[in-house]
Amino acid sequence: MKKLFYLLFLLCPVAGFVQQPWHDYSLLNYAWKDVGNVGFSAGGAQYTSIATDPSGVFYVAYKDMGNSNKATAMKYNGTEWVNVGSPGFSAGAVNYTCLSISPSGQPYVAYSDSANGWKATVMKFDGTSWTNVGSAGFSAGEADYLSLAFNTSDGQPRVAYKDFGNSRKATVMKFDGTSWGNVGNAGFSAGEVDYTSLAFNASGEPCVGYHDSVNSGKATVMQFNGTNWASIGNAGISAGSAYYISLAFSSAGEPYIAYTDNGNGGKATVMKYHGGSWVNVGIPGTSAGEVSYVSLAFNSYDGLPYLAYQDWEYSYKATVMKLHGIGWIDEGTPGFSAGRVDWTTIAFSTSGEPYVAYEDFGNSGKATVMKFDSVFVGINETQLSSHLSIYPVPATDKITIETQSTSAQGQLSIVNTAGQEILTRQVVISPKIQIDIIDLPAGIYFVRLTNDKTVETGVMIKQ
């Protein structure tokens, strides 16, 4: 009911400002769409990781079960997903693949490397082939939960991980152009860690969030100040144990941390460091149900944080939420994927569209990417003249549509939030058109009225 209230709040301006021009980023006119073919990997794809280069090209890296569990990376060429270099380019099987794009646009992949005792290895694509960045297997011991990111001030990569060579504590290493070295002390955390997540603040200092075993498995964030690692605020900031931790910085330079919150029923919680302490962003446990594979990122287009995750409330399918005002709302339909997903990860196009990659059990566990895109695909947006006024809100059996069209006839379409056309009919256009909707399931729908001159759109809610 709370989510319906948020949506009703958003819908009110549609009826009140019908003369406003079409806006390409209206939440109400978008739905989740496949990017290229679904299940595009050769086999099952685990540890999926998505990123976009400065020119807006999307890349996905993963553990490729179709190529001996080695690392594979693919990119979207605008039509289909194609291999970047050879598939299965790593020396052996991998775990914890993490993709990041350098400031110059080169894709880098970090992973736990079976060919080197499950130590950390990073490789980059030089335009022709994949090559090692420094030595393969450069960590002191086995490396789990790898997180790769670039410091834009020097253009070099850093890797954070759970370090079995240092009592399973957190370690961060950097590449200096020749070799890998520790950032501060190796194993700098107070105790064992899981779910390490690396990000940089505005000053270029690395920060790491993790599941902190010496603080009851709660979330802790630490920052390197140039000499030492120190906690940002208190250690153990979450209400209970925290899993699937994801750390990101806002454009204002504030650290945000998202996680599965066992202090709030296993739901998703987001916190930020503000005014000298960690505070909740929206309500704690903001998701509808329990979540896994949480991925947090900021959209540079609108400056808002977005969450992607496996949503237990919707049969373990993918859901994305974004911050709207002081609360979190679903971005399109929750549970939008074809089936269960694992390893959800989110990135954004240069025009602000969210893209989500995941292991897709609706397509044999292969890799799939979806984006939040217009439900009116194929319409020339220069034709869209105005919004329709549709009432009552909500409606039960009939809706009245007010149109500004002067044409005699047109086509009326009703589209659900998944982008499927539910109803299409030819209508005689008059200032007010009545449509029977009694047989439609309850939900939110988009209405489109087209003729030879214009396209008008609107939104209705069926109770």
Image: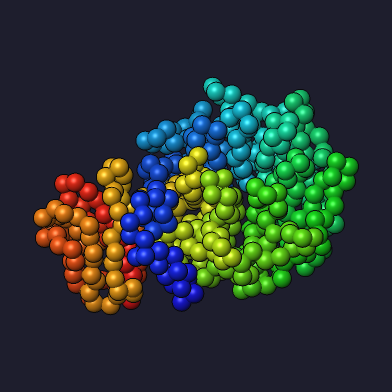
242, above or below 452, in the image = below
Q: Is residue 268 left or right of residue 80?
A: right
* Residue 453 point in image, percent of width and height: 19, 46
Tell me where residue 122 sits by quadrant: top right
Q: Nearer the viewer, residue 145 or 204?
A: 204
* Residue 429 point in image, percent of width and height: 14, 60
User: Does residue 358 appear in the picture of this structure?
Assistant: yes
At a point 24% along the width and 77% down the height, the residue shown is 397
309, above or below 7, in the image = above
Residue furthest to the right in view is 227
Q: Nearer the viewer, residue 329 or 453?
A: 453
Q: Nearer the viewer, residue 140 or 406?
A: 406
* Residue 237 point in image, percent of width and height: 76, 65
Residue furthest to the top in view is 128
* Residue 93 point in image, percent of width and height: 60, 40
At a point 74% along the width and 63% down the height, the residue shown is 278
Query: In which quadrant is the C terminus drawn?
Result: bottom left
At a point 55% along the width and 23% down the height, the residue shown is 127
How many discs appear? Answer: 0
Q: Nearer the viewer, residue 379 or 456?
A: 456
Tell me where residue 269 sits by quadrant: bottom right
* Colouring of the image: rainbow
User: Does residue 419 appear in the picture of this structure?
Assistant: no
At a point 75% along the width and 48% down the height, the residue shown is 207
